[in-house]
Image: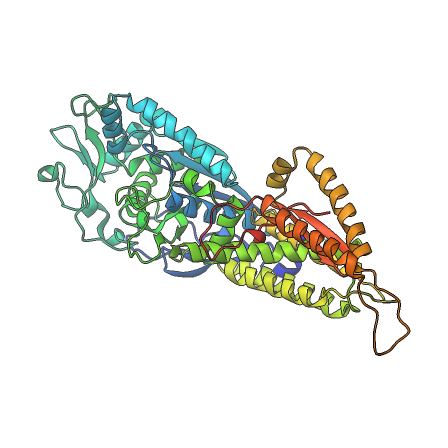
Amino acid sequence: MWRNAVKSFLRRTKGLNVRVNIRGSCSSRSEKKWIMPDGFDTGLKTFNSLTKQKEPLILAREGVATWYSCGPTVYDHAHLGHACSYVRFDVLQRILSRLFGVTVLHAMVITDIDDKIIQRGWQENISPTIIARMYEEEFKKDMMSLKVIPPAVYVRVTENVPRIVAFIQRIIENGNAYATKEGDVYFDIQSIGDRYGKFGGAGDSQESAGSSSKKDVRDFALWKRSKPQEPHWDSPWGQGRPGWHIECSTIASSMFGSQLDIHSGGIDLAFPHHENEVAQSEAYHQCEQWANYFLHSGHLHLKGSAEKMSKSLKNYITIKEFLQSHSADEFRMFCLLTKYRSAIDYSDSSMLEARVSLATISTFYNDAQAYIKGQLQCLPVQDALLWDRLAQTKARVMTALADDFDTPRAMHAITDMVYQGNCQLQSVSTVAGTTRSPAVFGAMMAYIRDILDVFGIDPLDNKDAETISQSGSLQAVVEQLSQFRSQVRAFALARQSSTSEKFPEALYPDRIPLLKASDDLRKNLAPLGVLIKDRGGNSTWELTKRAPELTDKMKPSTDKAVSG
């Protein structure tokens, strides 16, 4: 389904297998100008931080994207600020892979040696290695909980120190770094002329430690001499450990060579981290453009705060804490409703918006399913209108996602289609001889299921429902209970016959308590995770997740799951 849609889309944009013939990337030029890559046009445009504008996404190899991302520094639990960046880029990779047929080769570094890790080890009286391994595993579990697809490979810094030393040696040989008598090695900013400053901050001093030995205050450490009781490795300059930036250049180069398609990370990493990565990588490879595209995600803020969520500011919520009261799908929807490179405010109201968006889609999905099964009676459906709206939605979603992965615009198109579908699914008591149109609703359900699956969302949250249902036994009980209630309710709704126009048919007075009891049962089951809907003379039921503790504005009846 997706393959045909993509081919049609690319033909319209003239982007199918278009080879862009541009000169090679290696030379001695010393400008900051971005060079359009030589390769194959994906049909997408993406905002490139190197040019600060949208550019055609062109890959070196047809159907393959090399992608490197900065991973965590593993000294503590991951928080929602981390989750936001990783989930957003997971969505982008899913879109690129599932909708545009690009295989993403993703590598991520695990920074397992750092000042913060060493300090945490001293505080806990535990080896820094143990600290790093413990929080690395916690990070991976958190990513699984958020349904983030793992990279092709996680690479630890400590397992690549010999490569890092060799990488530094070549930069020195190329005339772009120097060793001090104390045993530190610094990158020589002046040696690359005006090529430094692609992301801004070119005139800023970066590191105070050892600044008296620097040639320029902007020079940054590639190798740090060891201090007492710190982990260290041997090198030509004495015992020490890698600087912060060199790890990413070395590992990305060892994985992908001198040419990288995409590099991603939070916007806070653009300078100095990514700036320095570019400088030392291009110095090592002696090429004028190492990474072709830099994608940066916006910060996550607590609403009302201008500061990003950060461990150092102690204004964070851990991923584990968040998942105690919200689902991974709710967080994904929260991320989808804003552009990946925009700042995003986290609050009860923003999470409620995400929850309501999911609930609206889930309600339509369940109602459409009930209609297809014949459990929901409606007036005649305008199926031609819905078929047309479905086609429009597919086109609008593809256009939005090809425009810098615009997920808010794509979700707006989807929810607009859902609204049109809901308008057609208005329940009525009786409809005699009405033509039904189940096929169009089946097609709409299939599309919603498929596109949300691309985003990593299950419209029915089946995994949670399976846990609640305990392998289906609860579903069978609820089915029997619902049937019994429907029979009692139908008996209570039966009306007395009357031949008088002045006194129309009325309910039997002695059966009204049965009707009230049926309504009470429906209301009492809802907070327990069983949602019964009366649809004229019929009833349907759904298992929902048991509502967590919410703010007063949040209603527990909005989480949908398995239906019957």
For the image, the number of numbered tags is 0
Question: How far across and down, in percent of the image, does residue 456 sit?
Answer: 56, 46
Question: How far across and down, in percent of the image, does residue 323 sit?
Answer: 47, 41
Position of 148 with respect to 99 (left or right) is left
Position of 189 with respect to 524 (left or right) is left
Q: Nearer the viewer, residue 420 or 111?
A: 420
Q: How is the image coloured?
A: rainbow
Residue at far front of view? 510
Q: Nearer the viewer, residue 490 or 466?
A: 490
Position of 295 with respect to 510 (left or right) is left
Q: Residue at 63% across / 47% down in the picture?
A: 525
User: Quadrant of the rendered structure where residue 103 is?
Assistant: top right
Position of 355 with respect to 349 (left or right) is right
| Residue 358 in view here | yes
Q: Is residue 377 above or below residue 521?
A: below
Q: Is residue 417 above or below residue 72?
A: below
Question: How far across and down, in percent of the image, does residue 381 sit?
Answer: 77, 68
Residue at far bottom of view? 502
Question: How far across and down, in percent of the image, does residue 403 sit?
Answer: 51, 61
Q: Residue at 50% across / 35% down in the picture?
A: 152
Residue at far left of view? 212
User: Quadrant of the rendered structure where residue 252 is?
Assistant: top left
Q: Nearer the viewer, residue 477 or 26?
A: 477
